Image: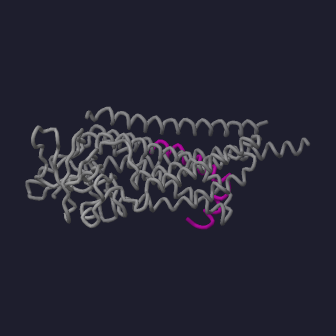
Amino acid sequence: MPHLPFIIAAYTFTLVALGGLLVWSLTRMRRAERALEDGERN
Amino acid sequence: MAVAKPKQQRLVLALAAVAVLAAAGVIASFALQDTAAYFKAPADIAASPPAPGQTIRLGGLVKTGTVTRPGDGLELHFIVTDMKADTNVTYRGLVPDLFREGQGVIATGSFDAQGVFRAQELLAKHDEKYMPPEVAKALEKQGHPVNAS
Amino acid sequence: MAASDLHALANPLRFQRLATALTPWLLALGLGFLFVGLWQGLFVAPDDYLQGKTVRIMYVHVPAAWFASGGYLGMAIAALSARIWRHPLADLAVRAIAPVGATFAAICLVTGSIWGRPTWGTWWVWDGRLTSMLVLFLLYLGVIALTHLHEDRARGLKMAGYLAIVGTINLPIIKFSVEWWNTLHQPASIRLSGSSIHPDMLQPLLLSAVGFLLLFAAIVLVRMRTLIAEQRLEARALRRAARAG
């Protein structure tokens, strides 16, 4: 059985899952903190 | 964020949570059954032999020097051992890459009337040791093979 | 840490400031360790004498497993703090950790399955280790679902907390399944007494693990900051509504 496709699949899933988690959490954070700042100025 | 969700949606979510819990419980009990053992060892088989035709999982080490393909070579013969007892196994089909003498194996199948275990499926089980090939070879030369059975 | 420091952390504003200062460092270091560890794992570390190249999946699978379990313990402790000591940030911590832990558990299950096919010869078995890890993932999903009961937020959080606490029984099952029962999954390679992993493989594993840990912490802090900000937005909206009304 060729090993490479399995290694690539595992690493790809890991990086996509971690990357997605990072992007999602950072986006929500920026949205919330920006709304907080905007509200404070007004 | 406080968003007023209709009572229906709240009920759905609560049901989802209960479903997840139930699933977890069902999976756990179904999968683990009575003893939570995934396989029986040769010593277990010797102590309480299963009825012929009853499907079980047999696990242990592939005894060194016992792997053969007699006759037309389509059937694999080997002995599974747990250092306390041995069981003869025959198997036709795809053999996992990691199947080899001195390594673990889990065979799913049943005993025939002659007391030979006819496997339908073979899984390779490896131990917790990881090392480069050169190290394994060096150990073997020193008389300490990585896997001995 | 002195008790006064813990009290300082209990103040959401102070915590938010600390978290804001820490986040970029944790993110940068986490990504750094992760990439160095995975680079070494993929291109520098040797093949395994038995598995060959496939062993490299270990460098993503094992850290994900460790911190999916470790994260669950943290979440349960937070839930306990919320119920017993009513620590103001504890419920937020439960909500912060759950999706991160769930993602790590998913990574563990998926990469483990991918690793199992060429080595064991199967994508999945219902043995003690694999089953208990799947239960861990489902418990995380349950906690997440319960924290989304918007109509009765407090009750949802309470139930989520109880689920998190009760679910800790699963943690020793995960750890000891491979010792107590016959399983397909092999026993632990790293114990207090030492490790059965060759140093050339252990090093990338530990580097990758540090990366995973720092990223877990970083993302939890990001989530805490988000939840605290959202909480403050909510409070402000309520105050304004009250004044207008």
Pick the quarter of the image with the N terminus of chain C: bottom right
Residue at point 30%, 38% (across, down): C42
Residue C147 in sight in this render? yes
Magenta-highlighted residues: C1-29
Residue extending furthest right?
C245
- In reply to whether residue C8 is colored magenta, the answer given is yes
Q: Position of residue C51 (x, y in %)?
A: 24, 44
In the image, C217 versus C13, the foreground residue is C217
How many marks do you count on the picture?
A: 0
In the image, C157 versus C242, the foreground residue is C157
Residue C198 in sight in this render? no
Residue at point 48%, 38% (across, down): A17
- In reply to whether residue B10 is colored magenta, the answer given is no
Residue extending furthest front?
B113
Q: Position of residue A8 (x, y in %)?
A: 35, 33
Q: What secondary structure characterizes most of the magenta part?
A: helix
Q: Is residue B22 above or below residue C3?
A: above
Q: Position of residue C7 (x, y in %)?
A: 65, 63
Judged left or right of residue C219, residue B89 is left
Q: Is residue C76 above or below residue C48?
A: below
Judged left or right of residue C139, residue C147 is right
Q: Position of residue C85 (x, y in %)?
A: 66, 65
Pick the quarter of the image with the C terminus of chain C: top right
Colouring of the image: one colour
Residue at point 75%, 50% (across, down): C152
In the image, C161 versus B62, the foreground residue is B62
Residue at point 9%, 58% (across, down): B143
Q: Quadrant of residue C10?
A: bottom right
